[in-house]
Amino acid sequence: MKIKRRDFLKVSSAAGLMTTVGCVQKSPNALSQDSSQKMIGPKPGEWKPTTCQGCTTWCPAEVFVQDGRAVKARGNQHSKQNDGKLCPRGNLSIQQVYDPDRIKVPMKRTNSSKGRGINPRFVPISWDEALNTIADKMMELRRDNESEKFCVLRGRYTYMRDTIYSHLPKIFGSPNGISHSAICAEAEKFGSYYTEGKWAYRDYDLDNSKYVLIWGCDPVSSNRMVPSAIKRLGDVLDKATVAVVDPKLNNSAAKAQEWMPVKPGTDGALAGAIAHELLVNGLWHKKFVGDFNDGMNRFKSGQTVDESSFSEKETHGVVKWWNLELKDRTPEWAAGITDVSAAQIRRVAHGLGKAAPNVAVWLGPGAAMHVRGAYSAMAVHALTGLLGAADSPGGVLQTAKIPMNKPPKYKKYQDATAKKHSKFKKIDRRGTKAYPAIAKGKSGGGVVTNNVADSILNNDPYDLKVVIGYMNNFVFSCTGAERWEKALAKIPFLVHLSTHASEFSQFADIVLPSTTNKYEKWGYVKTKANRYATCTLLQPVIEPLWDVVMDETEVPWLIAEKLKERGFSKLYDYFYNEYPDPETGAKPKNGLEFTINNLKIQTSQMWDGKKDVGGDKINGWNEFLKRGMWNSSAYKYHKRWGGKFKTKSKRFEFYSETLKAALGKHAKKHHAGIDEILEECNYTASGELAFVPHYEPPYRFGDVDEYPFDFIDYKSRLNAEGRSANCTWYHEFKHVDPGDVAGEDVIKINPVDASKFGLRTGDKVKVTSVVGSITCTVKAWDGIQPGTAAKAYGQGHWAYGNTAAADYNSAEARGGNNNTIMPAEVERLSGSTVRNGGFTGVKIEKIS
Amino acid sequence: MVQNTMVIDLQKCVGCGACAIACKTENNTPNRKNGQTHNWADYIHETTGSFPDVGYRTLPVLCNHCTDAACINECPTEPTSVFKTPEGVTMLNEERCIGCRSCQEACPYSMDDVLKDGQYSVISYAEEDQPYDAFFADKKELIPGCTSSGQDMVKTVGANPPHQTKFGHNEYSDSHRPGIVGKCIFCEHRTKVGEMPYCVDACPANARIFGDSNDPSSKVSKLLKAQPSFVLLPEKGTKPNVHYIRNYKKA
């Protein structure tokens, strides 16, 4: 115990406290002397617009700047989505820009040996040396006629991305611009695409909802419209019922009228039972789905229905769905699988039916990112169709159009080598027999990000020699993280563009210091919420700290200059010739001018006044910069009703003709049947069942006897994806994640399981799956289903900085990275990394 | 007479953490050290019941600006360093404060040492003869020559903390000194010029409402009149002016 001044004063009070105090009071000081004249109030400053990319909401934001310093943040006051407010991430971000552990200068490794725990011995180098080295390595590939072995790995991006991850590799001569998209929730998009024809995240009209069913996510914490959901949830609770499906008590569930703690991976069964109950009780929305010809309901449990007895309106295949899947999916059947009671399933189904079509079924990754999650995503999203909620007030909406221009055409800048080599197979093996990734109906239409590690390790389809990663940290953020350690160590020349010396950087030969997106970079993104689509600019609200550059545009420009010096000028020519300032026609003289021109070219429709594009009227470039954003007009209800859904049948499909065609094409390409493809992709369905939303039993790594817990991975509401763990406030306020403990990384289990396994809150534990182990702290908590163990993603950094890691120099992790214990499986049909659905069995052992 | 009051609507609150972090950006408070949180806004989290009938709620906490403030009664300086303003704010004069921590001991919502998660203290003490925030006094570079250090960052940016929000006030400063206590002052540097306390502005749920509870036409008065409310530890008799309305969970 410290000696406090109070104790000292108490002792000295016998000697006359008042005298002591009097001295203190009389002592002259600047503050008290002229206190009456002191100006009360904030010192001068300016709110400057930019964009927060702390999560995928991509909020239009503003930063208060005093004396050139960023001091605090809020939402853009013009935003019709966040209404000028940000979530905790927006406030936390101030610690990211002023993080002492940010990289100040380009650095190169001086230790040629690579691996976790091997100190790269980074030393500072000049930009010139860094760029010369990169250009030399790239030219070697051209010289050796293997330019396809160049690869750009994309992480957090803006829509300036095409420059670095499309134009750079394609003009250089490589097909390999690989995005991070599939480590996120591509399987969710599968659900909406193969029912209503939209490969995109959806919008939810909360203000007008009468029933909100949140499924496998926590909208007030994460999932793409966070401040908008935070603002509205309290009011929604007054006028609507909110039900939340999640095996753990999340923030929304803690406030909702109904919590349905579903057994992980059984979402498809629960959705099927809700659909069954809606149909047998005549609660489907007849204006959307249609009705029996004679108005008599023939949906009776266990009985097939004659298709010709039902006439559909905006939908396709409801009777086929019933006959193939739903007729036996009673609430009692589902209760036995999902651990949600039949009574609750009925209550929720009836509530939804009564509120239809003003119902928002909010589909989140927890229902989709399973090994067999494509069909559960469809099953949950099909409820939107059954309830007539697609494009309805209070329902599930799509996006109003954002009038963007595509970047200038690049093809004429491809020489013969580029043309040939950029058509090589991509490194991620998309579209191969076992990895259909049928995004937007096309075999190989999507990315399979997490395959890249295996491709590198197996030289399949070939090896990579020069790789540039930007704002990504796949060795931390991808499941099966250890494979990435080996893969990155194998790459002969790796460049990382990053704000921090992250785990990925530890394997890099050269690290280039990057701007922070929110505070120091030019760019733009598109986003939506609350019926409005938005284009919002990223702008440098402060002078960039240190010797940093913009990753997506400045770095390619600088590389282009160096390649030109070495006799390859195509990239430079493209940038120089095709990106004149659209107002003055002046060609760019440097990376900054190229960036601004690029931005102006892509966004001009919103500010040049040449054409009425709807939404906000903005008078010129300078006004656009000052406002920082553009709002669309409100999304029009019922926009796609009347046969305008972009599916094969032009209707909302319960029997997916769109999926049938896509799977058929993929199977044909590989001279196989659809059943064979499904089997290869870990699915159990065969025949016609493959074309309707249905229940697939969960796929699990690890035997239940040895690994008794279903592991639940979810996102902390303080995660700026994987990038905020070096902020002290992240750890200070970690307990805002329900059940979590500030300053700790806890795995939460039910108290029943805690006593069963002899574990107590605060115990240090080792958590082990079939692929790896992590250490963290256990917390016995009632908000979690027995048999499951939940831990938020975000900690377990062994690099990144002094706060994020326990010891950066010895690569000692602070907490545990969930991606170490989750196996690297993907949902094959979409390419999505698997994170949910109880696919990882774990055991938890006390460390003595 | 004015009584500045805050009402926190628990149905609107989602427990997100924005207010407490925003408070740190506005009031330039340091990182936790020596059992002192320096979180002028903080949280109580409560889990009740057992699976699946579980309740969970967040209670945002801050100085209650009590009408009968125990902290003032115990302050030994003359005049007292903690005192009531005409607007009913429990104000701290940073110059008069001698850092004796009697206020912290007297306050029912504060404690000497916050050692466990779940505890909080609305009054914190910054150790004498130590940097106000050790984080920004640190000279260690993560990668020598390639990254910065806390001290280097402060020097480069020209402020401590680097994100320091600058404002003026005659009782307290935008750059606190060690050896004294710190607490929420209802952002009087903002309210005196017609702004809301920053936690009110920053709350994305609009769950915090601020105003004069002695003015029957104010929003806080109307809310408190219209529905039941509660305060923390009413049995201590300090008459808090932070009130909670409605329930975190919708019944």
Image (spheres, coloured by chain):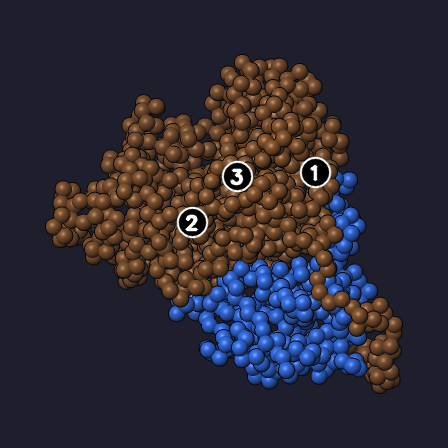
Chain colours: A brown, B blue
Q: Residues within 10 Å of mark 2 (few under 14, many from 20)?
A: some
Type of amino acid at the residue the image marks with label 2: Ala
Q: Does dot 1 land on a helix, a strand or a loop?
A: loop
First in residue order: circle 1 vs circle 2: 1
Residue at the (60%, 28%) spot, across then down: A579
- Can residue A264 be seen in the rendering of this structure? no
Q: Is residue A689 above or below residue B19?
A: above
Residue at the (66%, 15%) spot, across then down: A567
Q: Residues within 10 Å of mark 3 (few under 14, many from 20)?
A: some
Tell me the chain of label 2.
A
Type of amino acid at the residue the image marks with label 3: Gly
Q: Does dot 2 land on a helix, a strand or a loop?
A: loop
Residue at the (34%, 39%) spot, across then down: A197
Residue at the (57%, 30%) spot, across then down: A163
Instruction: Determine which residue is flagged by label 3.
Output: A609
The answer to whether marks 3 and 1 sit on the same chain is yes
Type of amino acid at the residue the image marks with label 1: Val
- Number of the front mark, 1 or 2: 2
Instruction: Determine which residue is flagged by label 2.
Output: A634
Which of the two residues, A679 or A529, is positioned nearer the viewer here?
Answer: A529
| Rendering coords of residue A712 (x, y %) | 46, 51
| Rendering coords of residue A825 (x, y %) | 44, 38
In terms of image quadrants, where is residue A435?
top left
Which of the two residues, A513 or A341, is positioned nearer the viewer here?
Answer: A513
